[in-house]
Image (cartoon, rainbow, N blue to C red):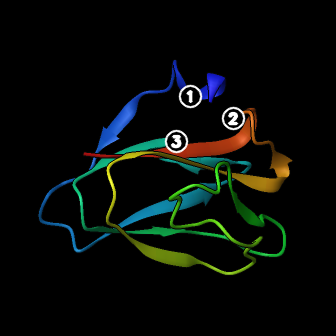
């Protein structure tokens, strides 16, 4: 996740019921999102921007390449990376992002 070290981390407001990560051109916004355990997170995905998890271990977005928006409960602490299978890679380059769960 080298590409995420210099990214600014967006602190998600505690009162929000679903924290959204949106596609903005060929980037995700916010690129890095910090949430509390059991927060709900939604990531936009489409045929043009297929979503894939960087790490299959405990990543709630793991298991497939998704071509529609995905929403998950972040029940485990850690850093969970994701990327666009068409415009990014598992190393964190290009269209990618991370969710920090505390």
Mark sitting earlier along the chain (1/2) = 1
* Secondary structure state at the residue bearing disc 2: loop
Q: Residues within 10 Å of mark 3 (few under 14, many from 20)?
A: many
Task: Give neighbour class at mark 2: few <14, some 14-19, many 20+ (Cα, 10 Å).
Answer: many
Numbered tag placed on residue 31 in the rendering: 3
Q: Residue furthest left?
A: 15
Q: Quadrant of the C terminus?
A: top left
Q: Position of residue 53 (x, y in %)?
A: 66, 57
| Residue 102 or residue 71, whichever sits in front | 102
User: Which residue has dot 1 on it?
Assistant: 4
Q: Residue 38 location in percent, x, y?
A: 25, 67
Q: Are marks 2 and 3 in contact (CB under 8 Å)?
A: no
Seen at 74% across and 73% down, the residue is 64
Relative to residue 90, is residue 62 depicted above or below?
A: below
Q: CA distance from mark 1 to mark 2?
A: 7 Å
Please give left or right for residue 33 compared with residue 14 in the image: right
Q: Earlier in the sequence, mark 3 or mark 1?
A: 1
Q: Secondary structure at mark 1?
A: helix
Most foreground residue, 55 or 31 = 55
Farthest residue, direction right: 86
Q: Residues within 10 Å of mark 1 (few under 14, many from 20)?
A: some
Element class at badge 3: loop
**Percent position of residue 72, x then y:** 44, 74
Residue 2, image x, y percentages = 64, 22
Note whether 64 is above or below 37 in the view shown: below
For disc 2, the marked residue is 92
Q: Which quadrant holds the N terminus? A: top right
- Contact (CB < 8 A) between labels 3 and 1? yes
Mark 1–mark 2 CB contact (< 8 Å): yes
């Amino acid at each position: 996740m080298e590409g995420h070290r210099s990214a600014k981390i967006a602190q998600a407001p505690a009162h929000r019921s679903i924290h959204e990560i949106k596609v903005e051109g060929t980037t995700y916004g916010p690129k890095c999102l910090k949430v509390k355990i059991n927060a709900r997170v939604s990531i936009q995905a489409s045929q043009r921007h297929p979503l894939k998890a960087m790490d299959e271990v405990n990543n709630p977005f793991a298991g497939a390449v998704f071509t529609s928006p995905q929403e998950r409960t972040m029940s485990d602490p850690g850093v969970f990376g994701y990327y666009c299978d068409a415009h990014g890679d598992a190393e964190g380059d290009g269209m990618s992002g991370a969710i920090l769960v505390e």
